[in-house]
Image (cartoon, helix red, strand yellow):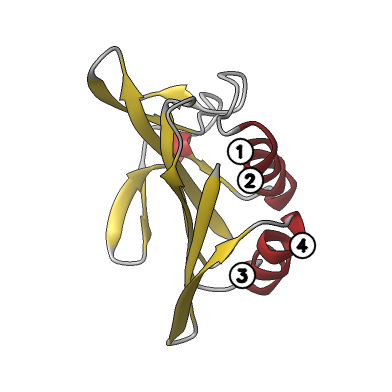
Amino acid sequence: MVLKLSWTLDGDGGNKKISAWDDIEFRLDRIEGKDGTLTIDVINSNEIEAECLQLRAEKGFYFMTLGGVKNGEYVVKTYRDLSQPDIEVMILGDNWPAQNITKNFDIVKLVFKEFFDTGNVETRLLKVR
């Protein structure tokens, strides 16, 4: 599985192919508590269904999506916490349900690590929208 990491942070951005967790962890450490995006794209693999994991971050709020094809249909999974109020929170100019947002950066790291290790994320962490 070949992965490409893309990021935006404080008006700067870039992308590169990655092969080590350290590359992702470095970018995660930089985005914690800041405004920006971090995306991992799967460049070539016929073995997994997930294609893209994206994090949007602003003011300590984190919104994650995992997209991929399942049974011929494109499916998006997000973090879900039903204990949160049924309101919307703006992150990077778009409104997202508060129930799909976390302020716990350890969860963000766990999701990214699982995606890096397995090419997917268990439904206990991300659920189909």
Q: Any mark on residue 112, and which?
A: 2
At x 37% / y 36%, what residue is drawn?
A: 67
Type of amino acid under label 3: Ile
Tell me which corner region of the image, top left, top right, bottom left or bottom right, holds residue 122.
Answer: top right
| Residue 26 image position (x, y, % from top left) | 72, 69
Would residue 114 appear left or right of 70 to someone viewing this image?
A: right
Q: Which residue type does callout 2 highlight?
A: Phe
Q: Which residue matches tag 4?
A: 22
For the N terminus, the image quarter is: top right
- Do we see residue 57 in this rendering? no
Element at badge 1?
A: helix
Amino acid under disc 1: Phe
Residue 100 position within the rendered picture, expressed as x and y whole percent measured from the top left: 45, 37
Amino acid marked by disc 4: Asp
Using the rendered image of the protein, determine whether residue 113 is visible from the camera's viewpoint: yes
Asked if disc 3 and disc 1 are in contact, CB closer than 8 Å, the reply is no
Give the residue number, with chain letter if any, for mark 1.
115
Does residue 22 appear left or right of residue 84 in this picture? right
Q: Residues within 10 Å of mark 4 (few under 14, many from 20)?
A: few
Q: Are marks 2 and 3 in contact (CB under 8 Å)?
A: no
Q: Which residue is mark 3?
A: 31
Measure the alpha-carbon separation of dots 3 and 1: 18 Å
How far separated are the C-alphas under marks 3 and 4? 14 Å
How many labels were placed on the picture? 4
Secondary structure under the numbered disc 4 in the rendered image: helix
Callout 1 crowding tier (Cα within 10 Å): few <14, some 14–19, many ≥20:
some
Q: 121 or 97, which is in the foreground?
A: 121
At 73% from the left and 61% from the top, the residue drawn is: 25
Q: Residue at x 23, y 20 (%)?
A: 73
Name, please, the residue furthest toward the bottom.
11
Please tell me which residue is depicted at 66% across the width and 66% down the height of the picture.
Answer: 32
From the viewer's perspective, is residue 26 above or below residue 75? below
